[in-house]
Each structure stands twice: as structure tokens, then as C-alpha cells.
Image (tube, coloured by chain):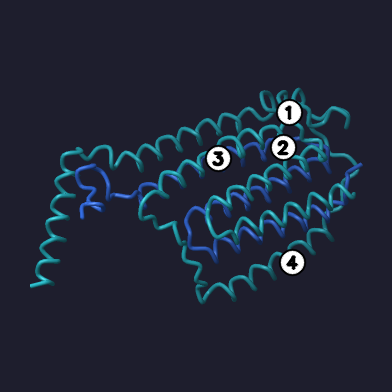
Chain colours: A cyan, B blue
């Protein structure tokens, strides 16, 4: 129980740090702390395999992707150098409505959801529940169709990334260089006009 | 026996999800908005896993696995859009760099 409170405090603090950091790099560090604490929480919920997956996929793949993008975009004049922090007018009412909805949801759920005596399913004894063997057996037998669907999702993601990122690649480099030269000539013409 | 009652996990997941919503609403930095979306995914995952433990049924864990896959796909596509939108177009050719030209 003490462990839960410690982990909850780390999770909430690092989440707040993530959304309030002044630079995206600090957010990544805070998010790393958040994911690590969440992995520990998964272990206490006897989801050992998912804890490992959490570390590998989130901390290993997604956060590294974020760091790469930050490194790619932070050179030179970057829109991320001084991220504007203005609050849109809709933020306060939207936040109040969202928080009220969530408070109600939590209240209703904690009232309504009592643990059932026993739910059937491909589960062994509580000791082996959530182990890699248990998880893998379920993944490749009963839940095979959702597992196949993940392959489809990843394929869609790959095609989407190529479609979005390939726009620049299709454009021949000579055209871009020409465009940059034209832009510079126009800037200089405007400057001359201003001086003269 | 779970480490804490299920209501605690519900409240924790709701708070984490709400912090994620707040990040998307308040911040205008696209990278931090994407990270806030990851926070929301994780809050949902926490609930799936907590209820899987409560009911001793690993369908919740399988679904959390699915959510992790979707989150990875979403991060990849979202970051590709961010790079395509905010790519620094200025220095494609070193001959065009004239900041120190004098």
C-alpha cells in the first residue's frame, strides 16, 4: 500500500512536470520517469510481461523517437526554441467540464464496479497470472485475431509515415535549391527597395 | 490480493488522464501535446491492467498490449507530421548559409 502511494506520487509529479516543462527535452526526461514508475506499478499488478514491454516500447522506442525529432528540429531557428505557452480562452471551461466529468466517472465506477466472485477465462492460478507463458498462450490462442489486427495497425502506420514523410523526398533537390535561391533574391530585392 | 483497492487505481488513472487532457489543451508545442497523448494512453493502460488483475482475466492485458501498439503507431505518424510541418527549410544547401558573410 505504501508502494502504491509512492508510485502514485511519482506518476502524478512526473506527469505534471511533463506538461509544464519549458523545453520538450525536459518533458522527455519527465516522461521517462513516468513510464518507469508505471512499469513498476504493472509489476505490482502481476503484469510482468507488459512491464517489460512498457520499458522496451515506450522508453526504448517512442521516447528515443521523440528525442530524435527534438534533435532534428532544434537546430537553427526553431519553432520549439521558445514554445508559446498562451492559454486559449476555451481552456478554463473545457478543463472544468472535463474534470467534472472525470470526477463523476470515477465516483460512479468505484460505486458500481465490485469484483465478481470468479470470471471465467483462459486463466491459471493467481500465481502464474500475467506471466510471459500465460500471456503468450492467450495471445496466440484465444486472442489471435486482435494480435493479427496489431500487424495491420503497424502496416497502416508504416504506410502513413511514408506518405507523410515522402512528400519532401519526391521533390527533386535541384528544385529546392532553385527555390531557396529565388527566395534569397527576393529578400535581397526587398531589402534594396527598403534602403532606396 | 491487490496492493491497493481498485478505486485507488481508478482515481490515479483519472488524474493521469486529466493531466494529459490539460497538456493537450494548454500547451501549443506539438511535441509536448504528443507526449500528453501518450500520458492519456498510459492512464487507459493502467486501468486495463488493474481490472485484468482484479478479475484475474488476461483479456485486459491483451487489450493493453493492443493499446501500446496503437500508441507506437500514433507516435510514429504524429512525429512524422510534426517533422513534415516544422522541418527547417532554410539550410538545404550550405552555399545558401550566409549568416557570417559580413
**Screen quadrant of the C terminus of chain A:** bottom left
CA neighbours of label 1 inside 10 A, class few (<14), some (14 to 19), many (20+): many
Same-subunit check for callouts 1 and 3: yes
The numbered dot on residue A152 is: none
In the image: residue A50, left or right of residue B78: right
Residue A100 to residue A5: above or below: below
Label 4, residues with CA under 10 Å away: few <14, some 14-19, many ≥20: some
- In the rendered image, residue A99, in percent from the top left (x then y), is placed at 68, 68
Q: Nearer the viewer, residue A160 or B39?
A: B39
Q: Answer yes or no: are tags 4 and 1 on the same subunit.
A: yes
Q: Which residue is mark 2?
A: B61
Q: Chain of mark 3?
A: A
Query: Which residue has dot 3 on it?
Result: A62
From the image, tell me which residue sits under label 4.
A103
Gap between marks 3 and 2 measured at Cα:
20 Å
Q: In the image, is A22 to the left or to the right of A174?
A: right
Q: Earlier in the sequence, mark 3 or mark 4?
A: 3
Q: Secondary structure at mark 1?
A: helix
Residue A57 locus on image (x, y percent):
60, 35
Residue B35 image position (x, y, % from top left): 56, 51
Q: Write down the chain letter for disc 1.
A: A
On the same chain, marks 3 and 4? The answer is: yes
Q: CA distance from mark 2 to mark 1?
A: 8 Å
> What's the residue at 26%, 53% (across, down)?
B99
Spatial CA distance of label 4 from label 1 is 33 Å
Q: CA distance from mark 1 to mark 3?
A: 23 Å
Say whether disc 1 or disc 3 marks the residue closer to the N-terminus.
3
Judge the density around disc 3: few (<14), some (14-19), many (≥20) Cα neighbours within 10 Å: many
The answer as to whether the residues below labels 2 and 1 share one chain is no
Q: Find the distance from the CA under tag 2 to the CA under tag 4.
A: 25 Å
- Given the current orientation, which residue lies at the most extreme front position? B102
Amino acid at each position: 500500500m505504501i508502494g502504491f502511494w509512492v508510485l502514485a506520487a511519482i506518476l502524478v509529479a512526473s506527469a505534471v512536470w511533463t506538461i509544464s516543462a519549458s523545453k520538450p527535452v525536459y518533458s522527455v526526461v519527465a516522461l521517462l520517469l513516468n513510464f518507469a514508475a508505471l512499469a513498476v506499478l504493472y509489476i505490482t499488478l502481476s503484469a510482468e510481461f507488459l512491464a517489460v514491454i512498457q520499458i522496451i516500447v515506450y522508453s526504448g522506442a517512442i521516447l528515443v523517437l521523440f528525442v530524435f525529432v527534438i534533435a532534428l528540429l532544434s537546430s537553427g531557428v526553431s519553432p520549439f526554441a521558445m514554445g508559446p505557452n498562451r492559454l486559449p480562452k476555451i481552456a478554463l471551461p473545457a478543463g472544468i467540464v472535463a474534470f467534472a466529468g472525470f470526477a463523476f466517472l470515477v465516483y460512479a465506477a468505484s460505486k458500481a464496479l465490485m469484483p465478481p466472485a470468479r470470471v471465467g477465462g483462459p486463466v491459471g492460478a493467481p500465481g502464474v497470472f500475467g506471466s510471459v507463458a500465460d500471456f503468450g498462450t492467450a495471445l496466440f490462442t484465444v486472442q489471435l485475431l486482435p494480435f493479427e489486427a496489431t500487424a495491420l495497425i503497424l502496416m497502416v502506420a508504416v504506410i502513413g509515415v511514408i506518405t507523410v514523410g515522402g512528400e519532401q523526398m519526391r521533390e527533386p533537390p535541384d528544385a529546392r535549391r532553385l527555390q531557396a535561391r529565388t527566395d534569397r533574391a527576393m529578400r535581397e530585392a526587398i531589402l534594396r527597395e527598403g534602403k532606396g | 490480493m491487490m496492493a491497493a483497492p481498485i478505486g485507488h487505481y481508478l482515481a490515479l488513472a483519472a488524474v493521469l488522464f486529466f493531466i494529459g487532457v490539460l497538456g493537450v489543451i494548454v500547451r501549443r508545442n506539438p511535441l509536448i501535446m504528443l507526449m500528453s497523448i501518450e500520458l492519456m494512453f498510459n492512464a487507459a493502460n493502467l486501468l486495463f491492467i488493474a481490472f485484468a488483475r482484479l478479475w484475474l482475466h488476461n483479456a485486459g492485458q491483451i487489450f493493453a498490449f493492443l493499446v501500446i501498439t496503437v500508441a507506437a503507431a500514433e507516435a510514429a505518424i504524429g512525429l512524422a507530421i510534426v517533422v513534415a510541418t516544422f522541418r527547417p527549410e532554410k539550410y538545404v544547401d550550405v552555399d545558401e548559409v550566409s549568416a557570417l558573410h559580413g
